[in-house]
Amino acid sequence: MDATRSALIVPIPEAEPAVAKHRDRLDLAAAWGVPAHVTVLYPFLPAAELDEHVLATLKRIVAGVPAFFLTLDGIDWFGDRTVWLSPNPAEPFRRLTAEVVAHFPGYLPYGGAFDEVVPHLTIGEGHPVEELTAAGEAILPYLPIHARVDAVRLITGREEPGGSWLTRAVFPLG
């Protein structure tokens, strides 16, 4: 059975100068080639199920949300395990997630592990709190980071050492 999965993300290339070297050490997704991003939905369909109907549905959903500007303006935490940047506004990300889940109800954000989905750009997770704290503090001088969000990217890959995630499709926002 093919273990290739998919995710919907919003890459934030403007954040790369601030976060890249920290993500390279502290975020496994960076090692898989996943850029600095805010997740819309993960996990999504197995890659083998991404047919033309799915792609057309995603295109229609994403086009229904207007492009917008965001500011990454603060460091926050999930417990003492994950340090992240908070996007402002967060509501367009919540709307995108809700719309995709409404059309694909079998795929809940993070597998349904959390009661509330908080849009965020991960800096690092699962490392000693001292390393995560140092990374967050090193990023503070770069804030705020401003970006225009105009597309959602569908990526596919494997969650394994040496895995590589690649762009399958890009869907423009309205």
Image (tube, rainbow, N blue to C red):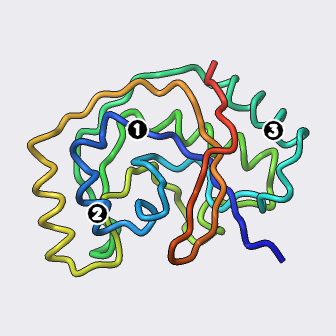
Q: What residue type is labelled 1?
A: Ile
Using the numbered discs, state the Cα–Cα distance from disc 3 to disc 2 in whole angstroms: 32 Å
Using the numbered discs, state the Cα–Cα distance from disc 3 to disc 1 in whole angstroms: 22 Å
Precedes in sequence: disc 3 or disc 2: 3
Residue located 72% across and 44% down the image? 100
Q: In this view, does 130 lie to the left or right of 93?
A: left
State which quadrant residue 73 falls in.
top left
Q: Which of marks 2 and 1 is in front?
A: 1
Q: In this view, does 141 lie to the left or right of 125?
A: left
Residue labelled with disc 1: 12
State which quadrant residue 88 falls in.
top left
Name the quarter where the C terminus is drawn: top right
Residue labelled with disc 3: 55
State which quadrant residue 151 falls in.
top right
Label ID, residue 148: none
Precedes in sequence: disc 3 or disc 1: 1
Give x and y (percent) for residue 166. Answer: 60, 51
Name the quarter where the N terminus is drawn: bottom right
Q: Is residue 122 left or right of residue 144?
A: right
Does residue 57 lie above or below 23 as drawn? above
Residue labelled with disc 2: 83
- Dot 2: within a 10 Å radius of its alpha carbon, few (fewer than 14), some, or many (20 or more) residues? many
Label 2: which secondary element: strand
Q: Which of marks 3 and 2 is in front?
A: 3
